[in-house]
Image: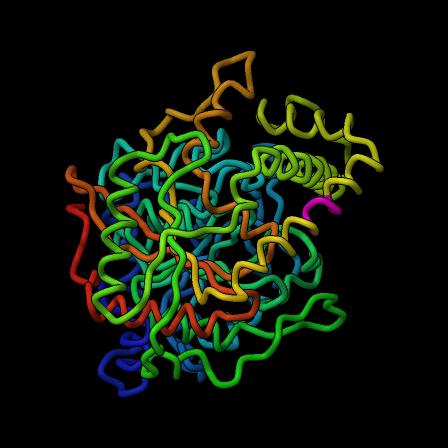
Amino acid sequence: MWLDATAQAELVRSKEVSARELAEAAIARIEAVDGEINAVIHRRFDEALAEAGSGKGDGVFAGVPFLVKDLFADTEGDPSHYGNQAMRDAGHRATSDSWLCARYRSAGFTFLGRTNTPELGLVPVTEPHAYGPSRNPWDKSRSPGGSSGGSAAAVAAGMVAAAHGSDGGGSIRIPASMCGLVGLKPSRGRITAGPDRDESGLSVQHVLTRSVRDCAAILDVTAGPGYGDMIIAPAPERPYLEELSERPRPLRIGLLAHTPNGTLHPHCEQAVRSAAVLLEGLGHFVVEEHPDVLDDPDNGRRFIARWAVNTRLSVLGLGAMLGRELGPSDVEPLTWAMATAATKIGAVDYAQAVAASARFTRRLASFWEDHDLLITPTLGEPPPLVGELEPPEGDPFATQAHTGALVPFTTHFNVSGQPAISLPLQVSPDGLPIGVQLVAAYGREDLLIRIAAQLEEAAPWLDRRPSI
């Protein structure tokens, strides 16, 4: 199962293997290693084998095994619990596919199951009380990240070549960095969030992959608006897959290699500086410049105000699905504390936070008038130990400062809606993956894919595999 999804699809098209054989191999791998990793929490193996054996799939990825994150991406008839124990105990199941999952089906992917996620995707590690922690295949004492941690762990462990993820504050890029994968957060409005969610918020969806070509090819089959979408990213000039063969012209790239409070771990700084040297060797001009607005200490406060309100809305949404109002015993302490904090944020306060986000976005975007890209570490620290960010009983916000130190670089671009990609360019001295983030102007996934392909060729990572 170490071939990427593109190569697996070619094997099926050429009839060298059947879709059922691919599904059987992926299922065998999940059964062999997931007891140690806890990535796949809902298994639909019998259904997947029946679907793979039907011979009906004819999409670009016909017959390729795939996993879907158990958060706001429904697959008809399957459990849909969002990392929440009340939803789990009620046995809640989805009644239809989300529009994105319908596109995955049309592309021919075989759904093997759904992956672990923190409750409502709120934190950058995957340790929900409902299903227990997922573990990093590179070091099982450490987290694979979150909130798409189950998906990332599954891909990194060779269970599947690609898996769905979502990113509201870094939740694709964070686990991509921790697990040594490619993780692209697309532009706001690039992929429809329908039918139940809109595109105006912080979160977007895509996949975690091992190769850049899978990232591009899957974006080709999923990008585009749905009926009634209110934000639509500009259409690309050509398929994203074609960007792999187009070498970028010399680019001007800004470098951010510090945090405002000076807490950046030396392994993360070394990773981004090494990537900068690599880019210069490829003919690009890297200058240690970054948008000044990123240094504003109020950025985090405004983001948390929106995050808290989103949490409250999500808790209300779970209650609507369960047909009753949820209380503190139905969700984890941090979730309840965040949702409760939202009740103290008035309508005018929230409107001011959104307005401040708009001003922030415009100031940030001006950097791309004379820069092509920005390069940063993906994270401020290497992968934390499992349980390290679990708050102690009675103090749900106790670990928030540590969380902020772990993720100082990702949330900005959820606010701005810009595309950003984490690439597995470095490994720490103790063998842990360290990702590097590249950010482009709004709508410029094409440029990110082009430069990512160049870096993948110059510093290949596909042969790196965890000991598991």
Identity of the residue drawn at 28% across and 72% down: 454
Which of the two residues, 391 or 108, is positioned nearer the viewer here? 391
Which of the two residues, 247 or 145, is positioned nearer the viewer here? 247
Question: Residue 403 in the image: x percent, y percent?
Answer: 46, 31
Give the answer, above or below, for where 384 lies relative to 314. above
Question: Residue 48 in the image: x percent, y percent?
Answer: 42, 65
Magenta run includes residue 356 = yes
Identity of the residue drawn at 58% across and 60% down: 366
Quadrant in the rendering for residue 350: top right
Magenta run includes residue 231 = no
Magenta range: 354-358
Give the answer, above or below, for where 126 lies relative to 183. above
Identity of the residue drawn at 17% across and 56% down: 464
Q: Is residue 88 visible?
A: no
Give the answer, above or below, for where 40 lies relative to 48. above
Question: Residue 346 in the image: x percent, y percent?
Answer: 82, 32
